[in-house]
Image (cartoon, helix red, strand yellow):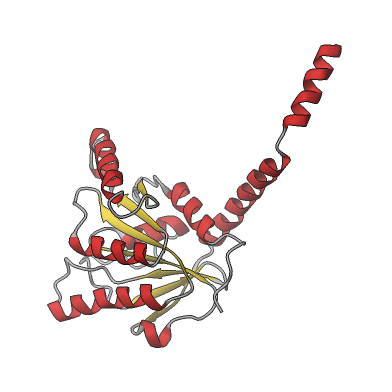
Amino acid sequence: MILSYIFIMYLVDTIDYQKICCIIKTFEDNILFQKNYHSTWFLKSIANIQKEKYNYGLEVAFVGYSNSGKSSIINALTNQKKLAKISRTPGRTRLINIFSVTSEIRLVDFPGYGYAQVSRSISKKWKEMIFQYLNIQKCLQGLVIITDIRCPIKEIDELVINLAVSLNIPILLLLNKMDKVTRSIQKSKLFSTREKMLNFSNNINVELFSSFKKIGIHKLQFVLNNWFSSDKKLCQ
């Protein structure tokens, strides 16, 4: 009996209460943000990021090739099938779509680069729009780059990654459509992509994702929650 009491007292003394409080807070934040994601609404579409960018709150941007499944990922994240419109012809989106998670938190969906049947001048304009945004938007907290797991990382992806790294913008690279390949390919692709990202930075997060199978949503939410965490200063 005495030994049991001593053991219990030892456990109490060795508990890291600060760590426990941090875990509880993270859990509560995850629940709160999940409700907010599910309440996300379409705010507006813009054509000129320099003239129409927001100067308050926090933002996370989504970029990637037109056939990478950006719209499907945003819909999976928010648990809304029709929030981000999915075109039968990839690349039809030509404006920057802004979604509000809360009055102070936004998701920014850029037109997909490449693939679409558009002129080179328009495609170049879209790429320049992304580069301009990364350079001037002080509200940006992180960048989600979406790729098709069946396709290699392409030159434009690498240019975006290089710029984001140089500007100290956190990056989450999602290997989407993992349900289209076998488990062995999933593992090898995840490993090889993580290895490749070390050439750019050791802080790039690479994860598997499937909007169709709803796989990877919690990891995506966790990363966004961290970027949108309450200790971040709101852009003003």
Residue drawn where x is 29% and y is 50% of the image: 197
224 vs 194: above or below: below
Provide residue 204's location: percent of width, then percent of height.
37, 52
Provide residue 33's location: percent of width, then percent of height.
57, 57
Left or right of 104 in this view: 88: left
Query: 230 or 87: which is nearer to us?
Result: 230
Q: In which quarter of the image is residue 34?
A: bottom right
Query: 50 or 29: which is nearer to us?
Result: 50
Residue drawn where x is 61% and y is 56% of the image: 32
Left or right of 75 in this view: 87: left
Answer whether residue 176 is visible to the viewer in this image.
no
183 vs 162: above or below: above
Provide residue 231's location: percent of width, then percent of height.
61, 62
Residue drawn where x is 47% and y is 48% of the image: 218
Provide residue 226's location: percent of width, then percent of height.
53, 55
Q: Quadrant of residue 143?
A: bottom left
